[in-house]
Amino acid sequence: MIDLRSDTVTKPSPEMREAMANAEVGDDVWGDDPTVNLLQDKCKELTGKPAALFVTSGCMGNQLAIKSHTNPAEEVIAEWDSHIVKYEIAGPSFISGVQVMPLKGTHGVMDAGEIEAHIRPDWYHYPKTSLVCIENTHNRAGGTVYPLNEIKSVSKVCRNNNLKLHLDGARIFNASVESGVSVKEYASQVDSITFCFSKGLGAPIGSILCGDEEFITRAHKYRKILGGGMRQAGIIAAGALYAVENNVTRLMEDHKNAKHFAEEISKLPYVVIDMESVQTNIVIFNTTKDANRIREVLEGKGVVVTNDGKDKMRVVFHMDVSAEQTDQAIEIFKTLKA
Ligand SMILES: Cc1ncc(COP(=O)(O)O)c(C=O)c1O
């Protein structure tokens, strides 16, 4: 089975499992877990932020960030197709009592001028705009990289207007290895950043939220309220630590496989693909055939993918898919007759 549904389907390698089995642990709710503390220190170093908090998931990282940056009845600007808007179940309204103003981006990138134009004037009819959220890489745009100069423009708008800026960097290492921009440099432009260990980096569980001390102190309390305090969490933190120490540079292999796959399937008559969107490990394309049917037929032939409606498909490359398996998947796609 070649599983191309998501980069979240990876299983921990024997070496990662060994690191997890041997992890020193303590009670992290007491702040006593040495491996969690090591991981948080490592993430402070990677992002250049003064504080870091280990959290269960990317969703939890994003929602804690929104809660810690805002007050109820305020407004958050985010890209309309971002994870926060599409897949976090109205979390900003449920958890933080805020409303999201979704703006449409190009390849997931919002125009800084448009963000500025949507900041609410101070008037009693309006909510106060207090936060902007960006996503790098942008999942639903096809794993696209948010260019550093665009982030700098958004950051400037936020600073000039007293807004906080949060970066959903679930796949920030994919952006970093592809662009050559360090995670620290991306993080320097934002007030907070979250990233995931359990996507391309191959760990089974966990994400991190980084920011300044005051922000993380607030987020720590909210993590507790949401039931996110974990006890001997060093076992999973060890997998995360192994992932950031060993699995970053190899992400380029996933990008290479994704681009090769996209180039090959773009030659098929029923595939319509925007090659500009294929920048990292995700390939999203349209098809003139029924996408549900394609998914079912591929599954029968040992290739698992996802579709979004009748004409859109998503294929994701990760550490458990080799170059040989990529070629096999391409050959199987080619057997689907036009
Ligand atoms: C861009 C982005 N942000 C956040 C998340 C949420 O991560 P998790 O599934 O760990 O909650 C995802 C998950 O796919 C994602 O793609």
Image (cartoon, rainbow, N blue to C red):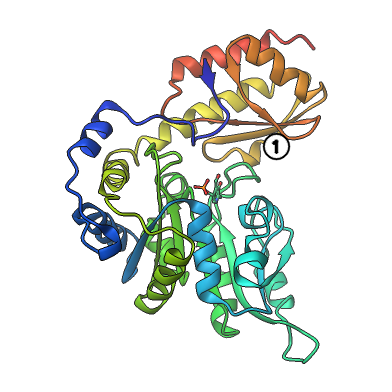
Q: Amino acid at mark 1?
A: Asp
Q: Does 3 sit above or below residue 144? A: above
Which residue corresponds to the image point at 54% horizontal and 81% vertical from the top-left?
Answer: 159
Is residue 236 something that shows in the picture? Answer: yes
Which corner quadrant of the image does residue 192 belong to?
Answer: bottom left
| Position of residue 127 measured from the top left corner of the image (x, y, whole percent) | 72, 82
**In the displayed structure image, the side of residue 107 where residue 171 appears, left or right:** left
- Res 274 → quadrant: top right
Task: Name which residue lies at 32% across and 69% down.
Answer: 51
Q: Which part of the image, by quadrant, shows the C terminus? A: top right
| Left or right of 325 on screen, residue 22 | left
Residue nearest the observer in this picture, 71 or 305: 71
Provide the residue designation for mark 1.
274
Disc tally is 1
Q: Residue at x 62, y 41 (%)?
A: 142
The answer, for residue 333, to whether it is visible in the render is no
* Classed neighbour count for the residue bearing mark 1: other residues with Cα under 10 Å, few (<14), some (14–19), many (≥20): few
Secondary structure of the residue carrying tag 1 is: loop
| Image coordinates for residue 219, horizontal then vertical, percent | 44, 70
Asked which quadrant contains residue 11, the reply is top left
